[in-house]
Image (cartoon, grey):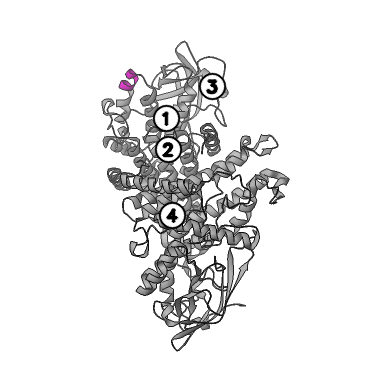
Amino acid sequence: MNFDFSDDQKLLRDQARKFLFDKCDRKSVRTILDNDQLHYHKELWSQISEMGWTGTAIPEEYGGLGLGMLELCVLAEELGRSLAPTPFSSSIYLFAEFIKNYGSEDQKKKFLPLIASGEKIGTFALSETNGTPKPSNVKTEYSSEKINGYKSPVSDGETADYLIIAANSDNKGNRNSLSLYIVDLHQDGVSKTSLETIDPTRPACSMKFEDVKAELLGEQGMAWDMTENIFNRAAVLYSFEQVGGAQVSLDEAKKYSMERFAFGRQIGSFQALKHKMADMYVKIELARSNAYYGAWALSTDSNELPVAAAGARVSASDAFNYAAKENIQIHGGVGFTWDYDCHLFYRRSKLLSLNIGSTRQWKENLISNLEKRNIV
Amino acid sequence: MDFNDSQQEAEFRKEARDFLEANAEKRSIISDKPNDKSPQIAVAGAPETVKGGKEAAQEALERAKVWQKKKAEAGFAAILWPKEFGGYGGSPIQQVIYSQEEHDYLVPSGYFEIGIGMLGPTMMVWGKDEDKKRYLPKMITGEEIWCQLFSEPSAGSDLAGIKMKAEKDGDEWVLNGQKVWTSGAHFADYGMIVARSDPSALKHKGLTYFYLDMKTPGIEVRPIKQISGTSNFNEVFFNDVRIPDSQRLGGEGEGWKVALTTLMNERLAVGDPPGLDFDQIFEATKELEVEDGLAIKNSEVRQKMADWYVQSRGLQYTKFRSITALSKGQTPGPELSISKLVTASKMQDVSAYALELMDSAGMVHHDQNPVLKNLFQNGYFFSAAMRIAGGTDEVLRNIIAERVLGLPQDERADKKVPFNELPSGKN
């Protein structure tokens, strides 16, 4: 049995950790948090692009490094640890994966090199209303080669150059009415409105489309199936970000509890706090193991992926949400001040557990995929 | 990443599987045999539950001994033990592989694990050569069963608070006091015991460790009836029990150190408690009806099931991570320390929820008219014990906090004071 990352992958992890420790400290994260006008950290983005992170899992023939999904998992964990304020996930886990998996040869040649080099940024838009997205509440339409409609929230929409959008190609409002289209966002008819989010280091906007040109991605009427698959792939990557963030939340809670004294002793010596941190550890280890299984399924194109991805996502959301909120609790009063960093993780944890579908939606996915598989 | 065995591992797995296929019966998710040994819900280190009184228990014991002998002859009874004591001389990864395979079969469990897993290894470290030669091989074959006499009424989580008196009289020791929670004392032939030889020393310094014959005059074993209705544990009373000094393991006052050897092996000895997990409640929800149809179609049920699934598989994959380290010849990280903590509470939650899904039928816990073979009714009671036996949830959280996370120890009142001056409450 070899249920672990390879030595090379661990080396990549160490290098990434060191790099982000230097270049993506909390001060850098806060420059995005504290400035409404900045949507991502441009300098950091160009540095990680230069190192090729953006092209990690993109084949060499399309300008990438041609490494695998496991390497991308390794980087995801580090990006999650450092709270990197970049559009990495939108552009790489979503846009690039859609093109890589469903694009025509021409589309791959056109888009992937620009994404791999970090020169252009892509994202994805599905939701239009509050609540769980479903085929019948997608009102955006595609007809006569033009998109008309509205999407919100669109993660990293402000910074994105390209968008993959789900739109109705007929008016029946069912699963097979929806197709995916690629939109160049630098054209007339696209209007963006910034939205504040619960984590301003991961921004979003709403977008309006009026007679916007678009090209079909993949097969007509297959938007829902393609999205499910790409969300499964992204869920594994996000789960590594979440595990990374959860681990740092625990580390910082632990550090504070050993420095802070009350009643004449370190607060970390009180069982009430120790048990809380033990529970964080338990959830994080379960999440890490579920994420590993997701990574295995992702990297081997296993038909276990839907179950493995949902398991990874549910477990990682649980771990990060718990670790982030209890980290504030362990810090006491200073934990809910703007100055202390606890809220950065509290914000990120909730945002990450919502961005490609809520935890309750993924729990539902998990059980329905188990039913489909019919053997557990 | 892959889950493949190395060639050597695959060969060993085949050997194990061939043996099991030829000698044991496969386990099903929810057994067809109500109240039989299947599905077993093993309390950590406790023998399988046997209903039906003394005769049935005796029969089960004989069956277990027959099985153990076969297993020993095939070499699988003590995979980690050196060959000179009748072991397989194998590696931890081989032990894991065998356990994985055996998990799918209905075989007796709970009789020999404490001896082979914990007490044998203690004797290997601290025993004299002639003791090892005399006792270890019979431990493996199941001809002689051993029990561990550690806990006392006032020494549970705080194990070093042992009060059992050991007084030296010439070249003999006289034991007086009481042990409790002793698994298998009612059928054990031998036991290992920690006792206080010097009450005026510091708590961890005044202990001495012995082994003894359970038929020594003055020992009285009384089974404890648990909330499950079964008796897996005992109280053991010592009334002027005389044992020779030659049965001491380790030096006088070194008992705590010897006990730690025993306890360090506990994690390996107390394997996976099989029998009640996600898979069982998943099956049950396909049969049980709630107000809007089958339970598995109800969205509240599905939400809860997802939580148990990720706990269950999360633990399984955590084990895979540890096994990977073993397979590479490395020492696994501390990640498996979460195992029992998660398993016990999950079993309790799963059982209680399954009873909820049965609605008023969940009240029934009847041998002749069981609901889903009484699995969840049994689990409801067993899980309460599991959260305590082999380290309470609270002790396990302390261990994770202190040993894994490196958090400071709690302030302690018992570190610098002689044992006989420590406050001890009512008892």
**SS at mark 4 in the image:** helix
B185 vs A58, nearest the viewer: B185
Amino acid type shown at disc 1: Glu
Q: Position of residue B421 (x, y in %)?
A: 52, 83
In the rendered structure, the answer to whether residue B354 lies left or right of residue A30 reads: right
Report crowding for label 1: few under 14, some 14 to 19, many 20 or more residues within 10 A (C-alpha). Answer: many
Return the residue nearer the eye: A88 or A6.
A6
Compared with residue B287, is residue A327 higher up or lower down, i.e. above or below?
A: below
- Whole-angstrom CA distance, mark 4 to mark 3, is 44 Å
| Disc sitting over residue B295 in the figure | none
**Disc 3: which residue:** A175
Q: The disc labelled 2 sits on which kind of residue?
A: Val
Find disc 4 in the rendering and name its residue.
B336
Q: Which residues are magenta?
A: A104-110
Q: Which residue is mark 2?
A: A236
* C-alpha span from label 1 to label 3: 29 Å
Mark 4 or 3: the one toward you: 4
Q: CA distance from mark 4 to mark 2?
A: 23 Å
Q: Is residue A339 visible?
A: no
Q: Of the residues shown, which amino acid type is indicated by label 3?
A: Arg
Residue assigned mark 1: A158
Q: Chain of mark 3?
A: A
Q: Nearer the viewer, mark 1 or mark 3?
A: 3
Instruction: Confirm or deny contact between disc 4 and disc 1 (CB under 8 A).
Output: no
The residue positioned 31% from the left and 21% from the top of the image is A110
| Residue B92 in the image, given as x and y percentages of width and height | 37, 55
Q: Judge whether residue B409 is colored magenta.
A: no
